[in-house]
């Protein structure tokens, strides 16, 4: 009798556990990546204030973590996107600069985040600017995305380009859906709808895939020039068209958050909000703002340090501001870890930095980070984000003031071997190699090793 009671109790307990497990959602977390184009570090609150109100990004920050020192390895469109989606430096994938129409782009030998997650059972979608290949086998519908909609390259690569209309006008700016062209030649009126179309696509995808784990990638065309916004946002910011564009992007963030909420997906979704690089400052009042040195197209902080917010309820302490440094190449291995998604048996440069992201005291597993412009290695930063060594290189700087979509003209600057202490000098003003000769030599050796490893000599 005693043993029968023990067995009965055991069976009851197993039954209780089974019941509990059927009530708990055990699906893998969803991943939403909102990737802006040419957004300045200081465009959105809470990174700065005094501009346009962005309450939805502020809400995202209040419910997630603000990362003040998040980087991209190259401050140019295609290179930055390839780094995000492959977890590798541009010098590994050989995706440099910004690709034009009909270019091959990212080779199929480098799997994208979408291909990796799809192989693990995720539904995948992209709504926005691809810019990683405009040939049949390198467009998003062939690179792991179940659903795809948007542009194959930058929205200024069209017949209305302010400086090279004949060159860019050789090919029409097309709008694609799921591998087929649905608008043959975009007009200005079409561009006013881009943010709306991307957002509607994202919302519909969430509604239709609420029962499946999904990877949703929203690489907005805005605020890359030429900038446009929907009619309901025109003149609403009170500070000009760029402010209106930011208002619409903020509203898009709000719509995505609300859709996750209404479908009961908030607690099981990781949201990443960031940009491909810093602002294109030669466009003046049609460009964003950064407090750091230089901007897009350079390896200085203004080009490569971008705003970042990550939200993962129950896993990240809400409302925290982190000073930890990490890079977009780290997102793929980190998200793979969080979703228990298998990475392919191929070399990648990013590392799982979840401990650093979730715990302010955790060290960075990366020894260093490398920054390039085109094929040129221009800077090496220590993994902890404190020390940054610039190699000798020239760079564009100090543009004349562009206005209303017409760019100003850059000057050319140059820099020799220069070491900055970013902790004390985030604006990169003072060379400290004489004060820290051992740090200088250590980073220089890393740079030399990197040049050899990636065949950049």
Image (cartoon, rainbow, N blue to C red):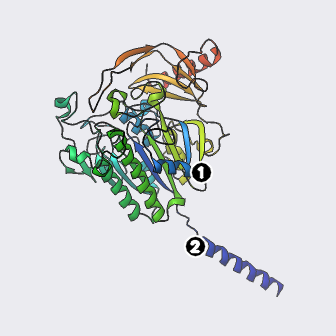
Label 1 environment density (alpha carbons within 10 Å; few <14, some 14–19, many ≥20): some
- Residue 135, quarter of picture: top left
| SS of the residue under disc 1 | loop
Question: In the figure, 238 relative to 22: above or below?
Answer: above
Q: CA distance from mark 2 to mark 1?
A: 28 Å
The residue at the far right in this view is 2
- Residue 384, quarter of picture: top right
Q: From the top left corner, tell me how far across and down residue 382 is, in percent.
A: 58, 27
Q: Residue at x 26, y 29 (%)?
A: 406
Q: From the top left corner, tell me how far across and down residue 419 is, in percent.
A: 56, 18
Looking at the picture, tell me which residue is in the foreground, 284 or 356. Answer: 284
Q: Mark 2 or mark 1: which comes first in sequence?
A: 2
Q: From the top left corner, tell me how far across and down residue 2 is, in percent.
A: 83, 84
Looking at the picture, tell me which residue is in the foreground, 282 or 183. Answer: 282
Question: In the figure, 235 relative to 456: above or below?
Answer: below
| SS of the residue under disc 2 | helix
- Residue 241, quarter of picture: top left
Q: Residue at x 18, y 44 (%)?
A: 185
Q: Which mark is residue 397?
A: none
Question: In the figure, 349 relative to 252: above or below?
Answer: above
Res. 379 in view: yes
Give the residue number, with chain letter if any, for mark 1.
318
Give the residue number, with chain letter if any, for mark 2.
22
Q: Residue at x 16, y 34 (%)?
A: 170
Whether residues under marks 2 and 1 lie with C-beta atoms below 8 angstroms apart, the answer is no
């Amino acid at each position: 009798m005693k043993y029968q009671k023990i067995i009965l109790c055991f069976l009851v307990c197993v039954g209780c556990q089974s019941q509990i497990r059927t009530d708990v959602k055990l699906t893998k977390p969803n991943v939403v990546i909102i990737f802006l184009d040419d957004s300045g570090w200081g465009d959105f609150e809470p990174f700065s204030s005094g501009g346009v109100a962005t309450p939805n990004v502020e809400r995202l920050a209040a419910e997630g973590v603000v990362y003040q020192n998040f980087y991209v390895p190259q401050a140019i469109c295609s290179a930055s996107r390839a780094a995000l989606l492959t977890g590798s430096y541009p010098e590994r994938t050989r995706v440099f600069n910004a690709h034009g129409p009909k270019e091959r782009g990212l080779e199929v030998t480098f799997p994208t985040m979408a291909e990796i997650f799809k192989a693990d059972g995720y539904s995948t979608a992209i709504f926005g600017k691809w810019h990683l290949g405009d040939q049949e086998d390198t467009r998003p519908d062939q690179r792991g995305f179940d659903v795809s909609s948007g542009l194959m390259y930058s929205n200024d690569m069209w017949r209305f380009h302010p400086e090279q209309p004949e060159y860019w006008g050789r090919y029409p700016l097309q709008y694609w859906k799921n591998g087929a062209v649905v608008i043959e030649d975009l007009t200005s009126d079409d561009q006013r709808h881009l943010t709306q179309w991307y957002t509607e696509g994202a919302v519909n995808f969430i509604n239709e895939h609420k029962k499946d784990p999904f990877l949703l990638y929203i690489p907005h065309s805005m605020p890359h020039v030429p900038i446009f916004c929907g009619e309901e946002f025109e003149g609403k910011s009170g500070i000009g068209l760029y402010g209106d564009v930011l208002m619409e992007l903020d509203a898009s963030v709000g719509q995505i958050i609300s859709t996750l909420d209404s479908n009961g997906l908030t607690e099981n979704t990781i949201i990443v909000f960031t940009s491909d690089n810093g602002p294109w400052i030669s466009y003046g009042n049609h460009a964003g703002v950064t407090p750091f040195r230089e901007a897009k197209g350079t390896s200085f902080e203004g080009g490569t340090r971008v705003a970042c917010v990550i939200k993962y309820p129950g896993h990240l302490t809400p409302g925290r501001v982190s000073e930890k440094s990490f890079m977009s190449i780290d997102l793929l291995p980190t998200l793979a870890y969080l979703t228990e998604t298998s990475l392919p048996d191929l070399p990648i440069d990013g590392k799982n930095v979840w401990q650093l992201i979730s715990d302010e005291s955790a060290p960075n597993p990366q020894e260093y980070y490398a920054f390039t412009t085109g094929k040129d290695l221009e800077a090496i930063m220590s993994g902890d984000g404190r020390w940054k060594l610039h190699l000798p290189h020239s760079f564009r700087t100090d543009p004349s003031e562009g206005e209303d979509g017409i760019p100003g003209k850059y000057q050319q600057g140059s820099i020799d071997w220069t070491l900055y202490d970013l902790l004390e000098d985030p604006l990169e003003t003072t060379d400290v190699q004489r004060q820290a000769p051992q740090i200088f030599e250590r980073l220089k050796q890393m740079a030399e090793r990197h040049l050899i490893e990636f065949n950049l000599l």
